[in-house]
Image (cartoon, grey):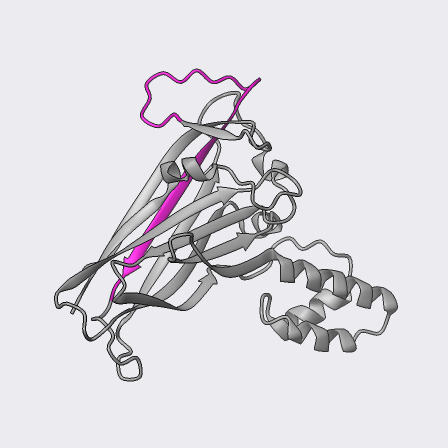
Amino acid sequence: MEIKVKKVFQELEISDFNTDNRSIRLLTEQGEKNYDPGKKKYLNFYTSLMASPSGLFCKDLKKSKEVIHHFEWQFGVSAPSAVSPVFDWVKALREDRSICIQVLVETPGPDCECIVTQADMNGFRPFNTMKDESTNYLSLAGSIIGGMSPIPMLSKAMGALTSKADKQDAAKYENRIKNMFRLFRFLTDKGEQGLEYVLTKDVLSQWGTFLKGSFNICFVRNASGSDGSSSYRIKLLPKLGFKEDDHLCYLPRPDQAEAVKAELTIEVKE
């Protein structure tokens, strides 16, 4: 099967974005837009999902390496091309769990399953604007870990620091890196698998407002299942977190998330 791509670009009018009453209204493809910067805010959401399937159903994982399918996603936010309704949405984001990218995988039946073999964020090197004053530490850490290499290396680097101030700055720097990006796996209320990329607003100051990630999936079916093809649905749901101290409060609300999702149906043949 050829590579599949789904792209969504929506201009949104958002209101009460940092409250439980948050809501969005689609402005895309509307004719005349009456912006009201005094009461509402406006954003453009771009979402894309690409699939690169490369094999057949897997009946023996040890013998079938070609069954892993590669997926890449992109999510970007911008302000609409208007004179006055631009607002600093990055500043308005909460400090923790600022951005959440959810991937939902729906299988076609009880005989079918999927295995997520890898997931990551793309393009997280090099660092651009870390402004810690621990100059000696930064030059040392940069030579040892090369930017975003595994955190345990930082602990070894800290042992080589001589001053107490440098060690304190190094610990602060290490914690900042640790919390930038987290990856969770979860189960939906329907028993389907999900991935969740959770990022802090620090990520945006380092790498900009256009984010990219990837994951690999191996599709599996019982040998007793029927022959032919099976359809798996992969959904990508991007969300922004504005309300402080409520990590479940994201824009858009769950009942409005479908408006900005990217979705692909993957046909995998026996």
Q: Residue at x 69, y 64 (%)?
A: 174
- Residue extending farthest to the left is 228
**Which residue is found at the position 25% from the left and 60% from the top?**
109
The C terminus lies in which quarter of the figure? bottom left
Q: Is residue 51 magenta?
A: yes
Give the residue drawn at x 38%, y 44%. Answer: 47
Relative to 24, is 262 above or below? below
Residue 122 x %, y % = 46, 60
Position above or below: 16 against 174: above
Which stretch appears magenta? 26-53
Measured from the top left, where is residue 159 in percent x and y?
78, 77
Q: Residue 176 versus residue 105: which sits nearer the camera?
A: 105
Q: Residue at x 19, y 61 (%)?
A: 230
Q: Where does the image place residue 198, in percent across and percent down from the top left?
A: 54, 53
Q: In the rendered structure, does residue 72 fall within the stretch colored magenta?
A: no
Quadrant where the N terminus sits is bottom left
* Residue 60 horizontal side relative to residue 128, left or right: left
- Counting the numbered discs, the total is 0
